[in-house]
Image (cartoon, helix red, strand yellow):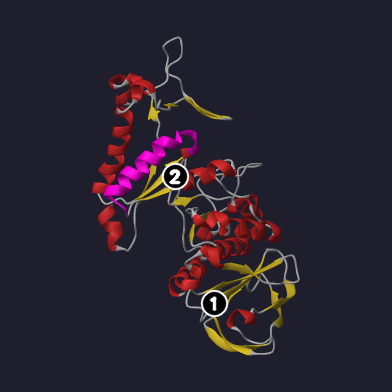
Amino acid sequence: LVEAAHAHGLEIALDFAINASLDHPWIKQHPEWFEWRPDATLKYAENPPKKYEYISNVHFYGDALPGLWLALRDVILFWVDHGVKIFRVDNPHTKPLPFWEWLIRTVNAAHPEVLFLAEAFTRPKMMKKLAKIGFQQSYTYFTWRDTKAELTEYAKELAGEMGEYYRPNFFVNTPDINPVFLQTSGRAGHIIRATLAATLSSTWGVYNGFEICEATPLPGREEYLDSEKYEVRAFDFDRPGHIKDHIRALNRIRRENEALHDFRNVAFINAWNDKVIGYFRKAPDGKSGVLVLVNLDPHAAQTTWFEVPLWEFGLADTASIATDDLLLGISFQLTGKNHQITLDPADRSAVIW
C-alpha cells in the first residue's frame, strides 16, 4: 500500500489511537499497563460524555513505566520502517503530556521527517500545549467558524503569537464531523469552505465524499447519516454537482504560489459587506501576492465594494497593477484601490487573483 501510494506521489498517514480492544494480548501479557476496577474487571475507556465499553485505555505511570512507553514507541518505529511518516494521533489531550514530549522527541531524533498531527478538539490552552511540546500539526476550530467576524478573528489569532509554535490544519469535515453549514448549503457551501481552508491555512484537508458534496446528516447531529464508520460506501465520484475540478484548481494554485505556503502572512482587506470576506497574502519576495474574495452566503448573490491593497507594493491609490485570475486563467489590469464585485453562488462564490 505504501509503495503504491508513493508511486502516485501520495503519503500514507496512520491513525495512532492508544487504547486496546478487550481481547488484546497486552491485557493478559501486561496487566500492569491497564486500569482495573476494585472488582478486578477492566475499566473501559471514557471521553465524557462518551463511554467506550469495548475498549480500554492504558495506564501510563506506576508499574507501566518504562515498558509501556517503549512498546508504544516501538509501534511507531515499526511503521516508520515500513515507510509511514505521518501519524494522526487520536485524542492526545486525554494522555499525559510528558509522554508525547518524550515520544515525539525520541522519534524525531532518529527520523526528523516524521510528522505528528494532534487530533484534539478541546480547550484552547491544551491545544496550545500540545503544539508547544512537539506536535507538528494541529486540528483547529475552523470547522465551526462560519461568519466573517469569526473567520477574521480566528485567522488573526493563529497568525499572531500562536504562529510561533502552532501549525493549524484546516479540515472542512472529518469522519466524525458533518458541519451544519455543509448540511444546509449544497454545492456552493462546499466550494466556499474548500476555498477558505485552502487559502487561509498552509495545510488543509477534506474527508471522503466532500468532493461530491455528500452531506446528508443524521437528523439533529453533526454526523453523516450513512457514515463510512459503520458501512462500506460506494460513491459515484463523477456524479453531477461534484467540485473535483475546483479542489484540483485550489491545490494547483497553492503549489504555484509561495504566498500561500505560510498562514502567518494573512492581511484582511476592507470589503464593505459582512457576507463577503477578503484577504491578501504576500509572497516572501514581496513581488507578488494572492488576493481572495469569498461570498460566505451559499444561497444568494452578494455585492460589495472592496480595496485592492496597492500599498503593499508601494503603489499610489490610483495606480494600476497586473492581475491574473487564477481560477479562470485570464489576465487583466486593476486600476485604483476601490472596486466593486458581485459574487453569485450560482456562478462563482470566490475569486483568487
From the viewer's perspective, tell me whether residue 103 is left or right of residue 329: left
Q: Is residue 341 above or below residue 228?
A: below
Q: Is residue 175 above or below residue 210?
A: above
Q: Is residue 144 magenta?
A: no
Q: Name which residue type carries label 2.
A: Ile
Which residue is the site of mark 1? 289
Percent across and percent down for residue 194 are 55, 62
Q: Is residue 223 above or below residue 330?
A: above
Q: Quadrant of the C terminus?
A: bottom right
Disc 2 from disc 1: Cα separation: 33 Å
Residue located 45% across and 52% down the image: 137
Callout 1 secondary element: strand
Percent across and percent down for residue 139 are 51, 49
Percent across and percent down for residue 305 are 74, 77
Which residue is the site of mark 2? 133
Question: As drawn, which residue projects farthest toward the top?
Answer: 39
Whether residue 276 is visible to the viewer of this picture, yes or no, is: yes
Residue located 67% across and 72% down the image: 269
Q: Name which residue type carries label 1.
A: Gly
Based on the displayed image, in which of its 4 quarters is residue 69 positioned? top left
Q: Which residues are magenta?
A: 93-112
Q: Is residue 105 magenta?
A: yes
